Amino acid sequence: MTEQNTKLGIVLMVCTTFVFAMQDGISRHLAGEYNTLMVVMIRYWFFAAFVIAIAARKTGGVARAAATRQPFLQVFRGVLLAAEICVTVYAFTLLGLVESHAVFTCYPLLIAALSGPILGERVGPMRWAAIGMGFVGVLIILQPGSGVFSPVAIIPLIAALMFALYGLLTRYAARLDSAETSFFWTGTAGMVTMTMVGIWFWEPMSQADWLWMGLLCLTGAFGHWLLIKVYEVAEASAVQPFAYLQLVFAAALGLTVFGETLRTNVVIGAVIVVLAGLFTLWRERVRAAQGS
């Protein structure tokens, strides 16, 4: 991978995090007005159409993309991600973008912690120390035992755990299936699941909010397209640290558009979590270089 491609990958990753932050802001608005399950369902209709269109353009078409030797795992992955999105969007309506993202940012640490029991990977003492430090940051954000602690603050932590499990299962699925196959099942299994659940919570939507819904669907598809391009031009280890910018963009949106507040403990905790996450990414890169 050339330096030029790495630089392009970084630029694309920054753009991706910005688009996903905008998607989160629109989701926060719509889920505040309508049922979360309905909002996620409509979003998945467009996402599934995008996934199928991408698959149809590839050699072998949809049939090749859908071919898998582990259908139950792929379906479970798709259902798990759909459920995680519902939990995350619901957290936005309860806690706002700032605090939800500050807690959710710990998901790379959860992936590192669970990679041992689920994937059989070795987690060394330095990575365990970083994981422990990251969860100290989460505790600083949540402030359990203090008068300001709210049980709903656990919701984005649950979402982070679900997303970490989804990420690990995606890596496990990659042992037998291509990225295109996993992407196909992510969209289609999620769409079927959300339709079965969300259709029962249908509500009339205003014309203005249909425009926002259209923008939500477009940002979702565009964000995933950008992410695909990121990993086409650069190594994941080189660009992944810049994914943390989504926290910055989402927090800025929460503060300026939704009038959220930025508490000192959230800032301190989020900084600790991000630093711990960056350290685990660095350790993974070092181990990969030593193993090559």
Image: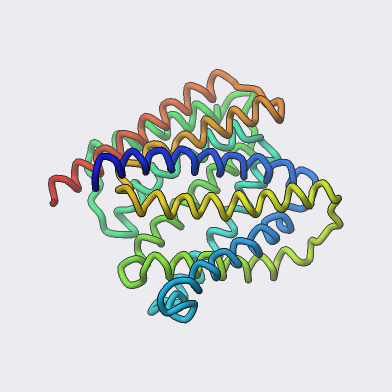
Q: Is residue 278 left or right of residue 18?
A: left
Residue 231 placement (x, y as % from top left)? 37, 52
Query: Residue at left 37%, top 37%?
Result: 241
Please give left or right for residue 132 compared with residue 107 in the image.
left
Q: At x 74% / y 58%, what residue is drawn? A: 38
Residue 72, given in percent of the width and then of the height, sits at 47, 75
- Which residue is nearer to you in this view: 95 or 32? 32
Looking at this rendering, what residue extends furthest in the front direction? Answer: 4
Colour scheme employed for the rendering of this structure: rainbow
**How far across and how far down the image is residue 259, in percent?**
71, 25
Residues 137 and 226: in front is 226
Instruction: Kindly identify the residue that appears in the image at 69 percent across and 68 percent down.
Output: 195
User: Horizontally, is 55 left or right of 221 in the view?
Assistant: left
* Closer to the camera in the image, 168 or 222: 222
Residue 57 lies, with reference to residue 260, above or below; the image says below
Question: Which quadrant of the structure image shows residue 147?
Answer: top right
Please give the name of the residue rendered at 64% of the width and 62% of the height, measured from the top-left corner: 46
